Amino acid sequence: MQIIRETKIDFMKYRRLWIMVSLALVLVGVLFPFFFGKLNIGIDFAGGTQLTLRFKEQPQVDRLRTLVAASGAGESQIQRVGDDADREVIIRTPTVAGSEEGSADAVVTALRSEYGADGFAVRSRENVGPQVGSELRTKGLLAVTFSLLGMLAYIWVRFELRFGVGAIMATLHDILVTLGLYAQAGFEFNLTPIAAFLTLIGYSMNDTVVVFDRVRENMRRSPGEPLVTVMNRSINQTLSRTLLTGGTTVVACIAMFVLGGEVLRGFAFILGLGVIVGTYSSIYIASPFALLWEQLFGGGKAAKASGAAKAARVAAVAPGKSPAPPKPGPIKSAGPKRPGAGAAKKPDGRTVSGQR
């Protein structure tokens, strides 16, 4: 099924402009989470205690914060969950120095003194110590790093190093841009977003491999043709597949975001937004960076390959050529015929003249 057929868009014409736009987005993706503190680090990485409570009556957030501080749990983060009719809140408190138990019991005791034993119900409680949070951060970072290195090795072996560089740059672009927008949205960053980013890495790499596979196929069909022309033609040929696959995935992510609840909302946000960004990067990031690598480090090799291709075409045509006709020499006069020159002998020995 094709929704777009026989397009001839010059994607590479404005590649420098789109690379500058992407660099600006990547800069935002780096600054907001890591320098401006916009990333909402969850309990899995920061450590501490998290309580999910459902109240009979709608509680006041300021009053809850005062009660939690009075319990000795320190500065807390309180967030309403769902609609107002649900009357659910999430209370997060930092780690308690010298304790692995957390502050859940102290917080529950302080709230019961205000709302009574039947005024609320504890839906869930989680406690992550500082050591465990640090280990989870390290393992999450290593998982993303090793997946990127594995993808680079795969592309390098299957295609060439220049394509591997383009694919890794596109994937890094997808991760950083999506992370910046995720931080701006204020979603909690825990182990679930790590799983979403690992899924996004695989999806983005697959999208890029489809384009590069067509590039390799067209390079074999048209040896010696400029790489920028081959890339343009390959992107146009795979454009319908890219848009169709990305569009159906985004629709599924929208359904998950709307109907999946609070737990899956962050996952659906990362994957849906990442698919859109990844579709863009497979066109305007992966191919331009592969082309840039070729121009910077593969010029001599490309020239040799082009010369070899031309020589092969000449050699293939040469055997089919007909030999050149010999040059005509001077015409000699036949002169008068001698008598009996056209005579022939019969089997009995008699001579027969060719003239009548």
Image (spheres, grey):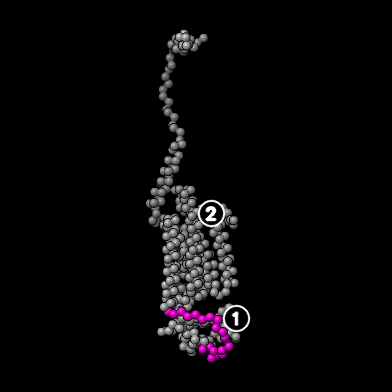
SS state under label 1 = helix
Is 128 contained in the magenta span? yes
Which is closer to the viewer, label 1 or label 2? Answer: 1
Is residue 2 or residue 136 the one in the foreground? Answer: 136
User: What is the x, y in percent for residue 209?
Assistant: 48, 58
Q: Earlier in the sequence, mark 1 or mark 2?
A: 1
- In three-dimensional space, the C-alpha distance between marks 1 and 2, rounded to whole angstroms, equals 50 Å
Q: Are marks 1 and 2 in contact (CB under 8 Å)?
A: no
- Amino acid on which the number 1 mark rests in the picture: Asp
User: What is the x, y in percent for residue 64?
Assistant: 53, 86
- Give the label on residue 86, or none: 1
Q: Looking at the image, which residue is at 53% across and 56% down?
A: 238
Residue found at the very far right of the displayed protein = 85
Is 21 contained in the magenta span? no
Asked whether residue 344 appears in the rendered view, the answer is: yes
Q: Looking at the image, which residue is at 48% across and 48% down?
A: 221
* Callout count: 2
Q: Looking at the image, which residue is at 54% across and 67% down?
A: 272
Magenta-tinted stretch: 109-130
Seen in the picture, residue 293 relative to 35 is either above or below; the reply is: above
- Give the label on residue 23, or none: none
* Disc 2 target residue: 237
Seen in the picture, residue 87 relative to 286 is either above or below; the reply is: below
- Amino acid on which the number 2 mark rests in the picture: Gln
SS state under label 2 = helix
